[in-house]
Amino acid sequence: MDSIRRGTINSNFIDITGDLNELDGLFTDYWKRVLPIGQSSSIALPFFHLKNEPFWELILVPELQGKDKFLPQSISSIKKLREIALGARIDNELFLFIQSNESREKLVNQLLFSCFSETAQNALKEIYVIHEQAFQYSIFLEDKANGKDISELPVIDTYKETARNQGFRRIVVKSYNHRCALCGVRIITPEGRSAVDAAHIIPWSETQNDDIGNGMALCKLCHWAFDEGLMSVSNSFTVMLSNQLGNHQNAAGLLGTLAGRGIVAPSEKEFWPNPSNLKWHRSKWNFSAVV
Ligand SMILES: [Zn+2]
């Protein structure tokens, strides 16, 4: 429902051979809200078990087509799911029905009402609203970076913090295509989880600036090193390292080899880091040899 509302699922076939990062992230948010802490799951489970519902047809890989009896009883991961299926097809009538905002909202409410306790209904409804706000916010940031007229879009003050964080992450990670701007690492698990965070160049707490130009996708290590002032980016978009990194007690590994290398920036120039934000970071952490 979230992805149909966003338009990221736009046909009645849901493909699982490509990037499932967003879909699994949406599912996980709901799961975490109603299941005990530590009980992890994957979108692979409902994706597989919905095959028992009349509106959900699992489309098997060619080798298994017509051989349903060879299917496993259960599926625990997207990797396993991909071994048996290409995706799923939703009943076309249902798909058309939930294209309309009004009927989709009715169905969402009915599902919540008939399957969950009142407490769970409220928790899940909140996630549903946050997901929509996060998506709208990411579109707002993208339009802003592209210089589009954004006067009609809601101002950022109206977004809850969670929606704001999710929206910023969505557009920054997408702009960098899941690649770390500083070291170039790009790792996505079979479940679609990515090694990068959406990092603020000037922290949100300082200027409340979620512009894509105040963000970079950074892997966990580079994010930490950037926030600690051990790495920065020059005016000509090359990686700068602090002398501290080479301190005799440190073994910087890969990070130690990055000095002077160009950052891995988005393909669209409008989404590159804003030089004045980078300057703020260099000056905060006393990177003196500014090029
Ligand atoms: Zn990195």
Image (tube, grey):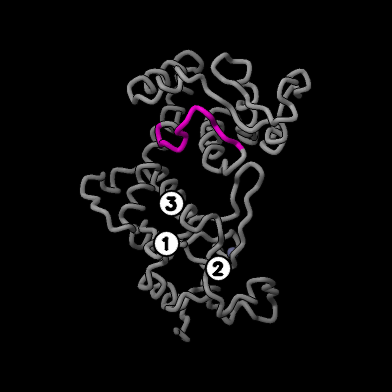
Q: Residue at x 57, y 65 (%)?
A: 222
Residue 104, position as x, y percentages in the image: 39, 22
Q: Is residue 69 left or right of residue 41?
A: right
Disc 2 to disc 3, C-alpha distance: 18 Å
Disc 1 residue crowd, few under 14, some 14–19, many 20+, Cα 10 Å:
few
Secondary structure at numbered mark 1: loop
Report the amino acid beneath label 1: Glu
The residue that mark 2 highlights is: 182
- Find ligand 1 in the image and state its quadrant: bottom right
Which residue is the extreme one toward the bottom?
Answer: 289
Q: Which segment did they paint magenta?
A: 5-16
Q: Depth check: 18 or 225 in front?
A: 18
Disc 1 to disc 2, C-alpha distance: 17 Å
Q: Depth check: 69 or 238 in front?
A: 69
Disc 2 residue crowd, few under 14, some 14–19, many 20+, Cα 10 Å:
many
Whichever of callouts 1 and 2 sits on the residue coming sooner in the sequence is 2
Report the amino acid beneath label 2: Leu
